[in-house]
Image: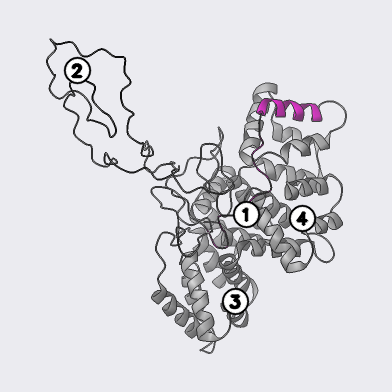
Amino acid sequence: MSYPYGTPGGYPPQPGYPPQQPGYPPQQPGYPPQPGFGYPPQPGFQPQPGFQQQPGYPPQPGYYPPNYPPAPGGYPPQQPGGFGGYPPQPGQQPGYYPPQQPGGFPPQHGGYDQSMSYQQTGALPTGPNYHTNVPAMHAGMTPQTQGTVRPASNFNAEEDAKVLRKAMKGFGTDEKAIIDVLSARTNAQRQEIKNRFKTMFGKDLISDLKSELGGHFESAILALMMTPAEYDADQLRAAMKGAGTDESTLIEILCSRNNRQIQDIRAAYKTKFGRDLEKDVMNETSGHFKRLCVSLVSANRVENAPVNMEKARRDAQELYQAGERIVGTDESKFNQILCSESYDQLRLVISEYQKIANKSLEQSVKNEMSGDLEKGFVSIIRCVQNLQGFFATKLYNSMKGFGTKDDTLVRIIATRCEIDMVQIKQEFQKQFGKTLESMIEGDLSGDYKKLMLALVRG
């Protein structure tokens, strides 16, 4: 479980106590001071006339010193949705999974160990501190990223539950009412609605939605109703269940989630399916691609170390020697660097590689590798360089040509609408010369289209 201010029970530094207000009479004589009683003077506290300050408790190790300056405004302000993948929930710092609902997944220990994916070079932090849970940023994310779905003002879970119950009660279903409520609430607010619905009506909201809806519209609504960790676990299980494996889903999720997210996904996977995610990945993949996936599932990427230019040059040279300079390719060297280094550090490596090889690292990977391994390494490189561009391309590819890859379309819109959908839409138009909304308009239909447009437009 993540604690908002470091170790369990810790609180943010507070300014000194205000001066005692007038009005209390001076202490009457006759009561001698008691040894060892009282608290130490607080910063900013002025003893009142006639009041004898008592000896205080000695300072305790591990606490803030008396004059610890409070950071202006506390933690740096974060954008809605946190970092790299999941929206902030009530009572949580941005960049962390929402609090688990009763009966949900077990609490996790420690903080986000990787930048959600959004570490920036320079003054921004290079990764969240594992012990204090200070959120960091992941590749491609800036402090200005915005979601299109934001917390509803004057939110009332009870009223929303009544609207949903009315929409599904009796003959027929009011899909518009369902869209209007669920597309305009954050994931945390939807969890509150789900709990309130069961309390008020003695019915399970998810079961009712399943019985009333169908097709891709149902799939999209159910995606919105899961917590982020549960939804990612569900998608990974679907990608590996039955005959064949959907490697593109494994690549998309594992390459764009941070350490803590992957740890929570593993816990959710175990709770929901009674299976070990790493073992399933090992059984469903092979060769160097299996090594890549296992490295990512292990959730041990460096996240807190400062960038090191000299090391970036060495790593770039080693990658060049492992690929372009030899006959064949040392895939393990690419795996070692691309799956281990922080995103800030990898950004430097990519830049230095261009200088050494006179071509991009992505181009070299395409020249040296093929199949799912190539796609995996290219996805990491693209997430590091431009995360919103990575998702914009995935959205475009899900709708171009004949047919629609609905699972990909729903997954990206459902997981990014609270994080950085505004910037994804900008990247989409920049890269493809059309708006994301216009492509959805032309590719989808019915209530499914209305829901996707509501989430994308906000």
Residue 147 in magenta?
yes
Identify the residue shown where x is 79% and y is 55%: 437
Amino acid type of the residue tagged 2 in the rendering: Gly
Measured Cα–Cα span from mark 1 to mark 4: 15 Å
Residue density around tag 1, few if under 14, some if 14–19, many if 20 or more, within 10 Å: many
Please name the residue that numbered disc 3 is placed on. Answer: 362
Please name the residue that numbered disc 1 is placed on. Answer: 236
Magenta region: 138-167
Q: Earlier in the sequence, mark 4 or mark 2?
A: 2
Of circles 1 and 3, the one toward us is: 3
Of circles 3 and 2, the one toward us is: 2
Measured Cα–Cα span from mark 4 to mark 2: 76 Å
Which secondary structure, mark 1?
helix
Q: Earlier in the sequence, mark 1 or mark 2?
A: 2
Which secondary structure, mark 2?
loop
Would you say residue 247 is visible in this rendering?
no
